Amino acid sequence: MATNKKQVPGKGESLSNKIRRFNEAIDENVPYELSSFQRFKLFMDFQKEYRKNGVLLLDYIQYNFYDKQKEDRRNYVVHGRLLEIMRTCNNPEHRYIFDEKPEFDKAFSKYLHRDYLYLKDASWEDFEKFLEGKDCFFAKDPKGMFGLGVQKYTLSEVEDLKALFDELKSHEILCEESLTQCEEMAAFNDSSINTLRVVSMVKANGEPEIVGGLLRLGRKGRIADNFHHHGICAYINPKYGIVTTEGVDKDNVRHVVHPDSGKQIVGFKVPYWDDVVRTIKEAALVVPDMRYIGWDVAITKDHKIALVEGNPGADPDAEQITTKQGRWPLYEAYLKEIRAL
């Protein structure tokens, strides 16, 4: 995969630059040689897909549109259709609750199962109290995405806590207690908290439904499990909580077992899946006019279901990549009912 997030081409981008970027993506990702004429045909095909269907270059490459018939392409949730899902399902006035981590922690405090402190409004005394009994904590950029903007601090390695507080407070950082994880999840990789991405949809009748899921695994020595942060993901059947695909990383390498621990990915049964489903369905109704949310979930050492964050623009790219199937027909059915309200 040529890039780690979707970027909309700039309005003023020259044709020569568009062709250059396209050729670079083709060279990096297409596993066979193409003639100049074939490249030109693909470029024109991509331009048509972009203008008519909102297909970005990353969509075109990661879903192998260069090898797919138009009928198959239409089954995929591409950038334009993701925007359609968000416009139909989510009230933009309430998006800040999910985009701003301090607001999320406040709204979903019941489901966090960890202590937190927003330094924007906190004193040194508040910070000292927050640190009591802790060996480490995470400092998060309130608006960070893709697992970025997160720093882990081990207290025994900090020489001047007051100086650290002043630095973090100047950037209005959110501090959160470190999560634990259950043995079954830690067995994949114990340097990161391995999480689940669980996607919920509040249907037209007001009932929440789990429509997708991913097992997300970190690599040895890394603290993040995010797919865009060198992690591995695999699709979870939302009905049974069982992993039904190989794990895939952002370089499109597929793994039957975790490459560091050797623990098998395919067929893994997510522990306490019924509790995960119940928790997400409850959380989905806290802000019911935000119908479409991708929840990041950790299963703690004492088997509690802890929400890490909620993403109102959750891209089903990893679900479509792992399953090699488009998910638009599923979402289209929900959208038709919601639009009819």
Image (tube, rainbow, N blue to C red):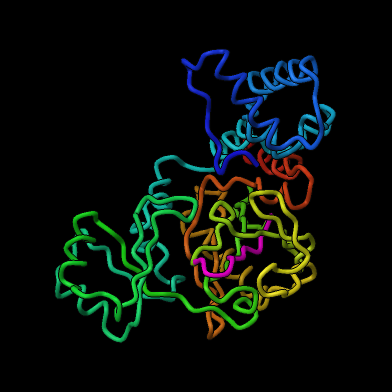
- The answer to whether one can see residue 74 in this image is yes
Near-viewer residue (3 or 93):
3
Residue 177 appears left or right of 128 = right
Residue 145 versus residue 116 in the image, above or below = above
Q: Can residue 247 be found in the magenta stretch?
A: no
Q: Position of residue 38 (x, y in %)?
A: 80, 19
Residue 9 versus residue 138 in the image, above or below = above
Near-viewer residue (105 or 341):
105
When asked about the image quadrant of residue 150, the answer is: bottom left
Residue 341 versus residue 112 in the image, above or below = above
User: Which quarter of the rendered picture does the C terminus lie within?
Assistant: top right
Q: Position of residue 180 (x, y in %)?
A: 49, 79
Q: Position of residue 189 (x, y in %)?
A: 60, 73
Which residue: 79% across, 45% down?
325
Near-viewer residue (90 or 321):
321
Residue 247 appears left or right of 154 = right
- The answer to whether one can see residue 341 in this image is no
Q: Can residue 214 be found in the magenta stretch?
A: yes
Which residue: 53% across, 55% down?
229
Q: Bounds of the magenta span? A: 211-222
When asked about the image quadrant of residue 333, the answer is: top right
Q: Position of residue 286 (x, y in %)?
A: 47, 59
User: Which quarter of the rendered picture does the N terminus lie within?
Assistant: top right
When asked about the image quadrant of residue 237, the answer is: bottom right
Which residue: 21% across, 75% down?
159
Near-viewer residue (218 or 94):
218
Report how many numbered discs are placed on residues in the image.
Answer: 0
